[in-house]
Amino acid sequence: MAKECGVEPSFPLKLLHKGKFLKDELTLAEQNVNSKSSILIQQGAPDEKQAEVAKKLEKQEQTERIIKAAESMASRTKDNNDDEKEYRFVLENQDGSKVKMDPEDQKSLILAMSLHEKGTKMLEKKEISTALTFLLEADAAYQKLKDSNFLEQIDNYARLNIDIMWSILKAQNITQLLEHAWRLIRAHDILKKAYGENNERLIELRGGCCPDLIIYVRLFLLQSIIAYHNEDIKKAKQNLLLCEHKLNQMTITEDNMLELLQMGFSVREARVGLRACNRSSNEAIQWLLNRRDKEEQKKEQNELKRAEKKKLKGFGLTCNGHKIHAKLLQVFVSQGFREDLVVEALRQSDNDQEKTMSMLTETPHLLEIAIQNAKPPFQPNPEHMDQLLSMGFSQSFAYGTLKFTEGNIEAAIEKLLAGEGIEENVPAAPVVEQTAPEPMSVDPTPLPDPGAPVDEAAELEKQRIKEAENELLEDIETDQFKDYDVDLIEETEFLNQYKTLILTNLNK
């Protein structure tokens, strides 16, 4: 095969089928290869490097799948998909209120934010190259926003630029770091606009907390490193001192933690609370208690929303295939109309408010009939029927009363003993008429051949995309105070490294 492909035999060929390399120890049939299969022939590296190359290729393919998964999930922002298994994102501001914007801009923003989250997770795992790929893809998504001014109003884009620069620093690519210095200038300008010159807006937003975030530690550190390599030692020293000051403010000792731990807070809660409140134990305790209350309230609200959505889904669709309008349903029920009647009216009127009101006020009996006709025939519990018959009640009274009480045996017994039983004959079982088979007609639409080959490659790729979605969801962080929960080890190491370099340079 190497001869046919015209390649050097010492470089082995790799045969790729449906995303997997064929194995010599298995037959073609065992690997689902037939005469119609497509095989990708790829020239491999020398034997000792094959495993490494294959691993890189697999990593690259997985990265591409995650990006595709993010694009797919970002498109599911409209409430037009009832499948609860499908993931959809909702944009919220710092107060938890939904953000309304152009659908295409919303898609781009969600894509950018989800890829940014994935990039930061890869940074934590020290997979720098992969992290940078996701972060740059996030940057590209931000650039697709129609309203370019929007980027100047949110801190997300500033954070992304700082994370990109941090990745470049960790990759030890100083040349590229200097080339992208503009990212830090832009990030700093955005933070000033978003938080205020002295972070006054952020302090107000955080409820009076001190906003000494990791973002500032990294920003000043990166600015110092760039100034040092540009031989601006004075500026490098100034930014390094700013970084060191922020770093010291975020340093938490065991003594700081002890009081909060004794009150039952976790290590993470204690660290976050102390950093958020400038290491004041009393303020941190109150802040954490308030945060718990807010989280509990939000949890309850989300549970109510899920229950309401599930309830609406159970109502089915209108005559034209639309979902029952939740707000109209709420309006009519608040006016005193029965919920089941309102649902039936909305279903028949296709959510038309005037027609619904007309049905509810003029022809409610027709709605009642429609509701009853839609119900499946009542089937009493045989044991309940036997129980009532053994007590001396007739079959018709037993059936009718159980039907009236919707199968509640206790209520039925009470009603029958009080002489208020309902008599109704037990319906006869439906008779299935035996009719002669109709002559067969020829359907021009061919039936699917059960033995026809399935597009296994497409199915496999679909499954992998779904797995990539699950992986992406696991990495998406919703805690707005996550910046307070970091160990600062890498930041401290870089600070000490460049502190030594700067002092050495100053002492020359």
Image: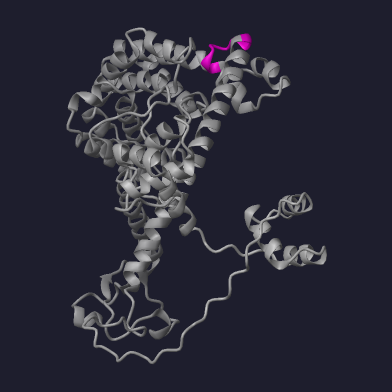
Residue ID at (31%, 37%): 353
Q: Nearer the viewer, residue 471 or 245?
A: 471
Residue 89 is at least partly visible in this image: no
Residue 104, image x, y percentages: 22, 39
Q: Is residue 311 left or right of residue 194?
A: right
* The quarter of the displayed image where residue 144 is located: top left
Residue ID at (35%, 10%): 238
Q: Is residue 367 left or right of residue 261?
A: left
- Using the image, determine if residue 226 lies above or below residue 201: below
Magenta-drawn stretch contains 128: no
Residue 297, image x, y percentages: 55, 26
- Using the image, determine if residue 465 lies above or below residue 202: below
Part of the protein shown in magenta: 275-282
Magenta-drawn stretch contains 281: yes
Q: Is residue 269 left or right of residue 276?
A: right
- Using the image, determine if residue 363 lies above or below residue 447: above
Q: Nearer the viewer, residue 227 or 455?
A: 455
